[in-house]
Image (spheres, helix red, strand yellow):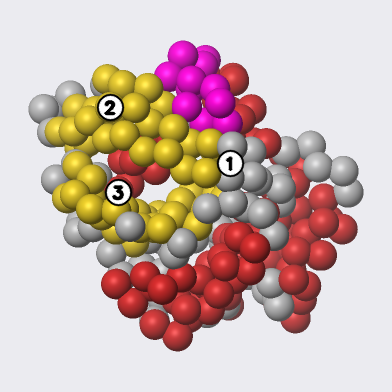
Amino acid sequence: MKVVELKNVKKIYPDGTIALKGVSLSVEEGEFLGVMGPSGSGKSTLLHLIGGLDKPSEGIVKVFGKEINHLDEDELAEMRKRKIAYVFQFYYLLEDFSVLENLTLIGELAGIKNPKKKALELLDFLRLSHRINHKPYQLSGGEQQRVAIGRALMVEPKLILADEPTGNLDSKEGFRIFELFKELNEKGITFVVATHNDSLKPFFGRIINLRDGEIVTQR
């Protein structure tokens, strides 16, 4: 089953910047896809279009078989809430809330039954049970990113989009995050991960390379 399908997708911003130049791409269910390329190559734009955070200027974007170009904001929000989760370079945790509260709040907003119980289970899986009452500023960068991943998992997503998720981490912590991604991928979650870090290539099942808004190579 194709989780993502892009056909001749272009993105041109109002200032005339061409971010994507006719990209066509399919992502199968259960894939661990790496999107690589230098800064400004179009990686983030590609993820934003897949996740419905932005709309293409031309072309078709299908996610879970639906052409999301024509979905209204409520339909897009529902899809994102139920099927898609994001992990970013910056953690975007609520600084005044504890680790447990950061996850529980997301579960409450998503209508998850017994969100506190689910949050505790996820934090145990993420090896963060000893940190549940800590605030984000009391955590290391790697721990904060694991909390952000836990927050993403609260909605039981079928697709995780990760944009430079190890960009603020040292190499050791970065590898730990990717080992966690791999474990989650083996449980059936599809991943599309944008990075410019060549040392992470061995983790991916498939890689596409973007340059100046075009796919130049893939393997």
Q: How crowded is mark 1: few (under 14 residues within 10 Å), some or many (20 or more)?
A: many
Vertical order, 200 against 190 (above or below): below
Q: Residue furthest bottom?
A: 172
Give the distance between the C-alpha atoms of the residues marked 2 and 3, in whole angstroms: 16 Å
Magenta span covers which residues?
62-72
Q: Is residue 41 visible?
A: no
**Lateral position of residue 86 relative to residue 164, left or right:** right
| Label 3 element class | helix
Q: Determine which of the numbered discs, if any, sits on residue 43 in the image.
A: 3
Q: Which of 187 and 217 is in front in this view?
A: 217
Q: Distance between the residues labelled 1 and 2?
A: 22 Å
Q: On the picture, is 91 further left or further right than 16? A: right
Who's the residue at 64% across and 45% down the image?
158
Q: Where is residue 152 in the image (x, y as percent from the top left)?
A: 62, 52
Q: Where is residue 212 in the image (x, y as percent from the top left)?
A: 14, 45
From the viewer's perspective, is 211 left or right of 36?
left
Amino acid type for the residue under numbered disc 3:
Lys
User: Comparing marks 1 and 2, which lies closer to the viewer?
Assistant: 2
Residue 8, disc: 2
Q: Residue 128 lies in what quarter of the image?
A: bottom right
Residue type beneath disc 1:
Ile
Circle 3 Cα neighbour tier, 10 Å, few/some/many (<14 / 14–19 / ≥20): many
Report crowding for label 2: few under 14, some 14 to 19, many 20 or more residues within 10 A (C-alpha). some
Sooner in the amino-acid sequence: mark 1 or mark 2: 2
Q: Is residue 192 above or below residue 140?
A: above
Residue 177 inside the magenta-drawn segment? no
Q: Quadrant of the C terminus?
A: bottom left
User: Which of the pair 8/124 is nearer the observer?
Assistant: 8
